[in-house]
Image: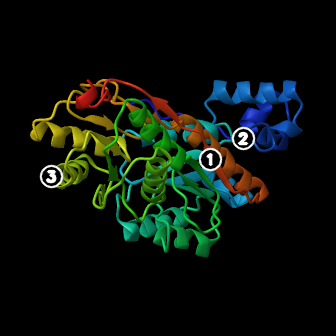
């Protein structure tokens, strides 16, 4: 016969073990009120809770405080390696404040994203991190606004006055173009991201402005926007550029997954990278240094993005702080996918 399950340990038992009043134990175990308890007493309470295996009753705490200590996050493709370091850093920052992160993946479906917002709101999340929003008329963002949910955007801006943490997309693309130009490239095409997303629009604008700043011609048709950020979409866009644009020596891609697709298109066309054509990406997602040749790309500080977004959201939850967009600086990472054009090799 199996032994009986141990009875759950309540807050009163923890308080008795630590020699304090239950209200003191409650404050000591709540990150938001821990500062109200003398450090030695708080340490005794935390030590007693750990020793006894105490876990707060989340439902009771939610009823008492009006907060669930849960934060939701929507990402457009949880299998995309870009989001792993962002979510890990956000989860760590939230855990320091006693919050847990719930992640939902609506893919590229705006209606599904809005449904997930409704589901997370029904679970009384304290706030939301959104990495899915489009520039205009985004259903998920509208669902957050109508419910008054504290919201922060990650890696996207939504044009709705909602706080966001983003990379400087224009500057990143300017770095890629300047790098290619320094190698001697003059005929550079752009595999762009989805136009409805801020990353697609701003990186295209950055590419076009950088080409003009370098004094380089950009003929009509030398920019091809992919409908989504994916390897297959990158291959299709790069193939179109290679077939219709004579003399391309470099492809500047708006995303590393698009760049991987460009690798496929170049190889299918019999072009060697970088001997025949150079390719750059954008994001520096995990493992792009392991492909052959390793990808020259624009590094986004993903972990810092996750941390900043989480802390910004916590400020909104606790203090109602209204903040603007935090723009993080990107950096060029030069690897083996870029070199001088054929004529100068």
**Spatial distance from mark 1 to mark 3, Cα to Cα?**
37 Å
Mark 3, residue position: 243
Q: Secondary structure at mark 3?
A: helix
Left or right side of 75 for 109: left
- Give the residue at x 58% y 58%: 125
**Spatial distance from mark 3 to mark 2, Cα to Cα?**
70 Å
Tag nearer the camera, 3 or 2: 3
Q: Quadrant of the N terminus?
A: top left
**Spatial distance from mark 1 to mark 2, Cα to Cα?**
43 Å
Q: Secondary structure at mark 1?
A: strand
- Quadrant for residue 272, please give it: top left
Along the polypeptide, which appears first: circle 1 or circle 2?
2
Judging depth in this view, the residue of 332 and 288 nearest the camera is: 332
Give percent across and percent down for residue 113. 42, 65
Along the polypeptide, which appears first: circle 3 or circle 2?
2
Mark 2, residue position: 11
């Amino acid at each position: 016969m199996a032994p009986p399950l141990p009875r759950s340990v309540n807050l009163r038992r923890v308080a008795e073990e630590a020699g304090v009043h239950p209200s003191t134990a409650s404050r000591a175990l709540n990150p938001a009120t821990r500062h109200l308890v003398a450090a030695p007493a708080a340490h005794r309470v935390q030590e007693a809770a750990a020793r006894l295996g105490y876990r707060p009753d989340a439902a009771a705490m939610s009823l008492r405080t009006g907060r669930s200590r849960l934060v939701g996050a929507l990402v457009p493709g949880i299998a995309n390696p870009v989001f792993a370091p962002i979510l890990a850093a956000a989860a760590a920052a939230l855990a320091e404040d006693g919050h847990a992160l719930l992640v939902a993946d609506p893919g590229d479906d705006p209606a599904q994203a809005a449904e997930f917002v409704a589901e997370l709101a029904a679970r009384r999340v304290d706030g939301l991190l959104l990495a899915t929003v489009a520039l205009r008329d985004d259903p998920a963002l509208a669902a957050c606004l109508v419910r008054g949910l504290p919201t922060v955007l990650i890696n996207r801006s939504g044009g709705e006055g909602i706080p966001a943490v983003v990379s400087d997309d224009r500057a990143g693309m300017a770095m890629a173009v300047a790098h290619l130009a320094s190698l001697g490239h003059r005929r550079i095409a752009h595999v762009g991201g989805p136009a409805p997303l801020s990353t697609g629009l701003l990186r295209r604008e950055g590419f076009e402005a950088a080409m003009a700043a370098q004094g380089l011609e950009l003929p009509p048709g030398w920019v091809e926007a992919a409908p989504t950020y994916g390897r297959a979409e990158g291959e299709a866009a790069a193939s179109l550029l290679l077939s219709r644009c004579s003399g391309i020596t470099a492809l500047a891609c708006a995303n590393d997954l698009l760049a991987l697709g460009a690798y496929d298109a170049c190889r299918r066309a019999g072009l060697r990278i970088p001997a025949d054509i150079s390719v750059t990406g954008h994001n520096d997602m995990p493992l792009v240094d392991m492909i052959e040749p390793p990808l020259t790309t624009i590094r986004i500080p993903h972990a810092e993005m996750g941390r900043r977004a989480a802390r910004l959201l916590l400020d909104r939850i606790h203090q109602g702080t209204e903040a603007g967009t935090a723009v993080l600086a990107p950096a060029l990472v030069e690897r083996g996918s870029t070199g001088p054009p054929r004529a100068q090799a």
